[in-house]
Every structure is written in structure tokens, then in C-alpha cells.
Amino acid sequence: MRRPAVVTVPAPRVIGRIPAPHAPRPCFEFFNGRRPAPWDGATPTSIRECCPPDRVNFLPARRPNSTAIHAAAIQRCGGKPQRHHGVSYSHAHARSRVPASFHHRVAATACAGDGFSIRLEQHKYYRVLTLLTVPVWLTTLAWCLQQFVVLDFGIAGTIGWIASTGVIGGVLAINPAHELVHKSGRLEPLCGGVSLTSVGYYGFKVEHVRGHHVHVATPEDSSSAMLGESALAFVPRALWRNVRNAWRLETKRLRERGLRACSWRNEMVGWTVLWCVFIGVTWAVWGAIGALFFVAQGLVAASTLEVINYVEHYGLERHRIAPGRYERVTHHHSWNAPQRYTNWLLFNLQRHSDHHAVSRRRYQALLHHPDSPQLPAGYATMFVLALIPPLWRRVMDPRAMAFRAIRAAD
């Protein structure tokens, strides 16, 4: 078997995060076929110099010689551990429309630098993906409504269809909307608000950004579960408090500007009107049964979100430094999960630790922090586990208490 050619390119200038003496020359190995050839550890220019093999992601290249965007940043540089700065980009990839013979794969390794992160965040491809979820979800919801009204499901089928549609809404509507509402500008927050309104949980747009990210891992936060609290008790409380807090936050914002709370400037009023329009349209097209289905699937979707919130922050806490004041939010205050496939499905939501550390960072540039609290499995598994409280506590309570002890020792 012919060995792949190894090409060494000059190292990019790294600013800030990693000292220059520790930045190795990034190695790019191109090869044909579906699997890489075995690494040659004796070759001075092999990728083993830069990082251990289990930290490398093999990503489809945009073109045969593209290395700027489609790179997997290493966890360890030059064999020297970078505990607080190790990163791993697993979602940074795309395929170009080139002949199959040119569909090479690239394993690109480089130390994470400001330049790479900026280029990755500015890539429009990833922004388009999140925006496309809005029409895709609305089309899916309309199809589910049509099938629900036309077909005779029976009692069990009706419950299953509502639950299935709601879970899809949690993944396809709320999850991308979570990414969109964090961004500046008008288009992305607007699209995020439309998706959230389609499941009736539009208060999330206000409360999540101005409430949850401020109070995360404290008793004041509606979406942070306390140690020993079950998901069955957490979800109803979170749903009610998040809606209430969204109205309070928007009312406070308007009063600080000398405006009335009940006016068109109140964002919650606008989204409520749009939600009523959604209900009116479903009633006009699919009747009262369709309208009830629309409300029910939204309740399931919102509950799905809050179960994920339960998983993301269970048992973690920020230290109180003064009455009403807590330590700064870092990547230690959210559970992290590095599983690749669920990260691809959820727009890197499982890198939640870095999302809370830098909330404006786009999903494709989110970092994996090895020293964050780590979940034993991906969100799909942990979601099911959270619905079985005794099993959840048996798995997660020791991990939460162990991480608390580590933080107290630090």
C-alpha cells in the first residue's frame, strides 16, 4: 500500500493563548481513501509530534488543498500539555462540489490561535446552516399537523405523535434558536425568535440571554438544577419561572428607559401577538384539533429544552463572594460532553462549558475544555437518564460532589 505524502507548512503566528516557543509546525497529511494510513511515529514531520492520535479529527476538506478553515486544533502542543487552552474543533467541515476523485480527506493540526478562531467564526457556511433550520422546522411542523389531523392515530398514537413532534421541535427549533438569539444584528435574533414562538416558548429569547447567563449556577437561576433535585420537579418550576422572569426583565428594561411596559416596544408583547397569529393560522387551516396540537407540541418542546438545561448544570455552583454576588462565570460551571455525533446534531451544544465562558462565540468555534466537568455520555443518553431520577442520582451525584471538592481545593 502506498504511503501518503506528508506536507509540512509554515506555522501560523499564534497570539496570546499559547507561547510562541511551544507552537509546533502544523502538519497536514493528505490521503485518499476512507481510512488513514498508520502513523509513522519515527518520522520527524509526522502528526504525532503535534498531538496524540486520539485527539485528531479527520474532517472532509472543502477542496484538496484547503487548510485554513478545516483544521482540528490540538489538545496538546509539542507534547507539552496545555490544560487550560486545549481545544478541539469537530464541527468545522464542509464538502465542495468537486468530482469524487478529488474528495480527499485532510487531517489538519494546529495550535489554536486568535487568527484561526476569527476565520472560523466569520465563515458564512455555518451561519447559513442555523438560519436554514427555520424554514425546515416550519415545514416539518406543518407536515406533522397535516398528518395528525388526517390520520386516525388512536390514543397511544396521538400521545406518541405529539411527543415525537415536540422532541423534534426541541432539537430543530429551540436548539438552533439558542444559537441565533445570542448573536448581534437583527436577522439572526429575529429568526431565533420566530423559531421559539413556533413552540410557544418565546420568553426564552429574553430570559436566557439576560437571566440565565447572568445567574447560571446560582440559586437565582431558573435553569440551574440543584444537587439532589429530580428532573420531574425541576422542569415545571423552570417553565413557570422562565416565562415569569422574561416578562419581568423586559418590563424592567422599558421602565429604565422611561417607557411603559405595556407597549409595542415590549418584546414579549410582540412575540405573544405572533404566537396568537400562529394559533389562529393553525385553527383556520386545521381546525381546533390542529390548534390544540400546536400548543401541545410546544409544551413538549419547551419541556425537552428544560430537561437539557437540567443535564447541563445539575449540581454545579458558583462561589458566593459577597451578598448577592458570585464568582465570574467560567467553563467550570456547565457540564461538558465531547461526543462527536451528538455535537454535530446539536450544533456543538454539548460544548456548553465554553458557551457559558464566551457566550458570543459561534457554535463552530466553541472549545472543548478537558478541565470542565465531563458528562459520562452524550446528551441523547443523559436525556433518557434524567427521566429516571434514582438512576440519574446514582450516576451524577458522585461526579457533581467530586467536582465540587476539586473546585473547593483550588
Image (cartoon, grey):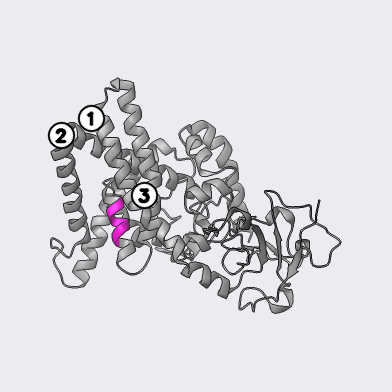
Q: In which quarter of the image is residue 48?
A: bottom right
Q: What SS does tag 3 mark?
A: helix
340 or 404, which lies in front?
Answer: 340
Asked whether the beta carbons under mark 1 and mark 2 sit within 8 Å of each other, the answer is yes
Asked whether the beta carbons under mark 3 and mark 1 sit within 8 Å of each other, the answer is no
Magenta highlight range: 190-195
Magenta span includes 170? no
Query: In the displayed structure, would residue 388 be above or below residue 407?
Result: above
> Mark 3 belongs to which amino acid?
Ile
Q: Which mark is residue 149?
A: 1
Q: Which mark is residue 287?
A: 2
The mark that comes first in sequence, 3 or 2, is: 3
Residue that appears at 71% across and 73% down:
9
Q: What SS does tag 2 mark?
A: helix
Is the stretch drawn in magenta largely helix, strand or loop?
A: helix
409 or 129, which lies in front?
Answer: 129
Q: Name the residue under label 3.
A: 174
How many residues crowd mark 1 within 10 Å: few (<14), some (14–19), many (20+)?
some
Residue that appears at 59% across and 53% down:
100
How many residues crowd mark 3 within 10 Å: few (<14), some (14–19), many (20+)?
many
